[in-house]
Amino acid sequence: MELVPTLTQIGYALGILLLLPLGDRYDRRKIIAVKSATLTAMLWLCSQVTGPSALWLSSLLLGMAATLAQDIVPVAAILAPEGKQGKNVGTVMTGLLIGILLSRTVSGVVGEYIGWRAMYQLAALSIAIIGIALWRILPAFAQHSALSYPDLLRSMLQLWRSYPALHCTARYWRKGCFLSGLAHSGQRWR
């Protein structure tokens, strides 16, 4: 069981790397719908598995689909009136962070009294409801980039190379590295 959170986090990192760039190429509303359905299915699958291998695999896939929240943030900026983008993104991010913090408490209580499987089932139900609501509320979004999927991935590599603060935080995260990377944005970190 101790591998479940680790594999979920690895899946989340893979989802950010491999799935998030799709929002620049395809309709975000459709991506949100597909990820909602996938996340619902993975949560339900996690509640039904009987062996550790199946739980590990479904946790990895669950983490990839959980990048749904990261697709909602740019939607908040796109739909915001001119000059209100920062406020809307801040509101969405605040909601996400409060949800993350409260979910640990709620899942602990539900897991203690009803069982961990019930928590996965309740989460699946809530994501299904949110996915349906978002499908009904959100407009279709125009394609933003003509880049192919491989080109989008290559553009992420270019961002990695161009921003030393990003490079520094991702690879080293040592004391002072992040702040000095921001202060010396022209310097390359190795």
Image (spheres, rainbow, N blue to C red):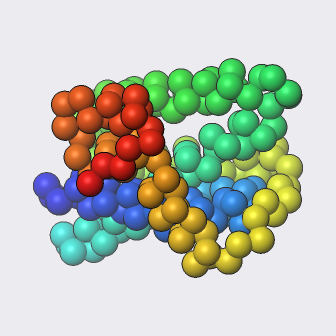
Q: Residue at x 38, y 58 (%)?
A: 13
Corner quadrant of residue 84 = top right
User: How far from the left and from the top, in percent, is residue 137?
Assistant: 81, 43
**Horizontally, is 190 left or right of 46 in the view?**
left
Which residue is at a point 62% across and 23% down the rendered structure image? 91
Give the quadrant of the N terminus: bottom left
Measured as percent of width and height from the top left, residue 121 is found at: 43, 52
Vertical relation: 56 (above or below) 127 = below
Count of labels in the image: 0
Please tell me whether residue 183 is drawn above or below residue 129 in the rendered image: above
Which residue is the extreme one toward the left? 2
Residue 73 image-quadrant placement = top right
Where on the picture, by quarter, is residue 19? bottom right
Q: Is residue 33 above or below residue 133?
A: below
Residue 158 placement, left or right of 62:
right
Name, please, the residue furthest toward the front. Answer: 186
Apparent side of residue 2 relative to residue 105 in the rendered image (left or right): left
Rendering coords of residue 167 (x, y %)? 36, 50
- Say left or right for 82 vs 160: right
Name the foreground residue: 80 vs 124. 80
Q: Is residue 57 visible?
A: yes
Quarter of the picture holding the C terminus: bottom left
> Is residue 38 among what the camera can see?
no
Seen at 72% across and 43% down, the residue is 75
> Where 14 falls versus 173 (above or below)?
below
Please state which of residues 122 and 139 is positioned toward the viewer in this rendering.
Answer: 139
Which residue corresponds to the image point at 74% horizontal and 28% vertical from the top-left? 85
Instruction: Give 75 or 56, whichever is nearer the viewer.
Output: 75
Residue 45, how many percent across, how many down? 40, 66
